[in-house]
Image: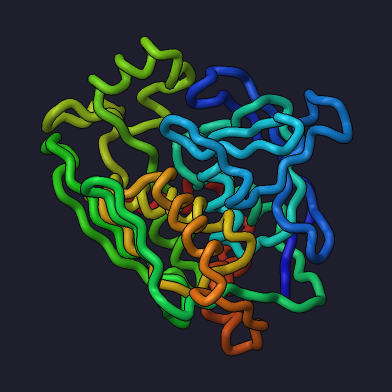
């Protein structure tokens, strides 16, 4: 069965890169609608952008989608991860600016809002995308790979010179609420030196120590330090979850990312869908539905974001 949000929920904040104030509303949508963004500041008829892999256009440091009329929404990865991680396949996201609000730099507040609003089951067939053979893309030292599995699993590896991050590796079975338990509160991160460069190039204008983990060598500059010792790799997994949600349906696959980012994950989806022999549609019966990322998540709500954040 498919699901949508039970009632509309509203988020307000600023865009991480634009610094623009944003109002965003997630509203219920019918069976088969998918996830669609609607720019309320643009004229009707040209302002809807489906959240799909083939609408992604090149962008620095975030995932950006665009429709055929040039309407755009950027930094969608955290809300897409929250929707995927709570099992919502249908929603209309009304937004009055070109960038999703960054909030605390993770998906925690989005998840809290969704669970407070409730999840409504829609009577109808749920399909998933099952891998039939591995697909891989490479770019320098970066590698992204999908291979057959009976549920979504994410395996991620990062390696940074800064001692505060260093080398981190993590593998998670994403079935049955793992996103809510393990990943949703992990924040975006960057080096202080990179912040300076980004701002010189008109990026990270809305970034603060309160909506990102900023490191400088061995130091964590953000107040309160880390929420997890391996928060950086967890956030990369959160990003991957959101970018994989642009497949348009749950993936039954093992995703491996080694120094991969948004562009690599989208490149991987493009390679997957370019190879008709690498995947197939399957109907989700009850035994398969219980292995999908959002299965059972409604049991966690309604909640407040701080109550969901577990420091480890």
Q: Quadrant of residue 99?
A: top right
Decide: is 311 above or below 128: above
Residue 193 x/y as whole percent: 23, 20
Residue 8 x/y as whole percent: 78, 47
Q: Is residue 29 left or right of residue 261?
A: right
Q: Is residue 96 left or right of residue 194?
A: right
**Residue at 11% over, 32% down:** 218
Q: Which is nearer the eye, 95 or 36?
A: 36
| Quarter that holds the C terminus | bottom left
**Residue at 45% over, 51% down:** 267
**Residue at 73% over, 47% down:** 36
Q: Is residue 221 left or right of residue 47?
A: left
Decide: is 282 above or below 152: below
Residue 293 in view in this figure: yes
Residue 219 x/y as whole percent: 16, 29
Residue 12 x/y as whole percent: 64, 29
Decide: is 170 above or below 194: below
Residue 9 in view in this figure: no
| Quarter that holds the N terminus | bottom right
Q: Quadrant of residue 222?
A: top left
């Amino acid at each position: 069965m498919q699901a949508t949000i039970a009632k509309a929920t509203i988020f307000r904040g600023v865009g991480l890169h634009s610094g623009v104030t944003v109002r965003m509303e997630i509203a219920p949508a019918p069976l088969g609608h998918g996830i669609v963004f609607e720019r309320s500041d643009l004229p009707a008829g040209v302002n809807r952008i489906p959240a799909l892999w083939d609408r992604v256009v090149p962008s620095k440091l975030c995932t950006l989608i665009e429709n055929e009329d040039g309407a755009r929404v950027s930094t969608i990865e955290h809300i897409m991860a929250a929707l995927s991680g709570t099992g919502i396949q249908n929603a209309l996201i009304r937004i009055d600016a070109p960038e999703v609000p960054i909030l605390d730099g993770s998906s925690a507040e989005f998840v809290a809002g969704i669970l407070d609003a409730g999840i409504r089951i829609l009577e109808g067939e749920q399909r998933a995308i099952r891998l039939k053979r591995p697909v891989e893309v490479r770019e320098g030292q970066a590698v992204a790979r999908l291979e057959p599995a009976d549920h979504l699993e994410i395996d991620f590896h990062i390696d940074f010179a800064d001692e505060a991050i260093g080398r981190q590796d993590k593998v998670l079975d994403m079935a049955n609420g793992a996103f809510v338990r393990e990943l949703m509160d992990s924040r975006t991160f960057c080096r202080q030196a990179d912040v300076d460069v980004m701002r010189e190039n008109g990026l990270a204008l809305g970034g603060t120590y309160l909506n990102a983990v900023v490191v400088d060598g061995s130091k964590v500059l953000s107040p309160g330090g880390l929420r997890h010792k391996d928060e950086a790799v967890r956030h990369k997994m959160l990003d991957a979850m959101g970018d994989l949600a642009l497949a348009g349906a749950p993936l039954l696959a093992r995703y491996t990312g080694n120094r991969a980012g948004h562009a690599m994950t989208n490149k991987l989806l493009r390679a997957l869908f370019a190879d008709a022999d690498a995947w197939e549609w399957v109907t989700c019966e009850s035994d398969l539905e219980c292995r999908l990322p959002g299965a059972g998540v409604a049991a966690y709500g309604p909640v407040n974001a701080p109550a969901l954040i577990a420091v480890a």
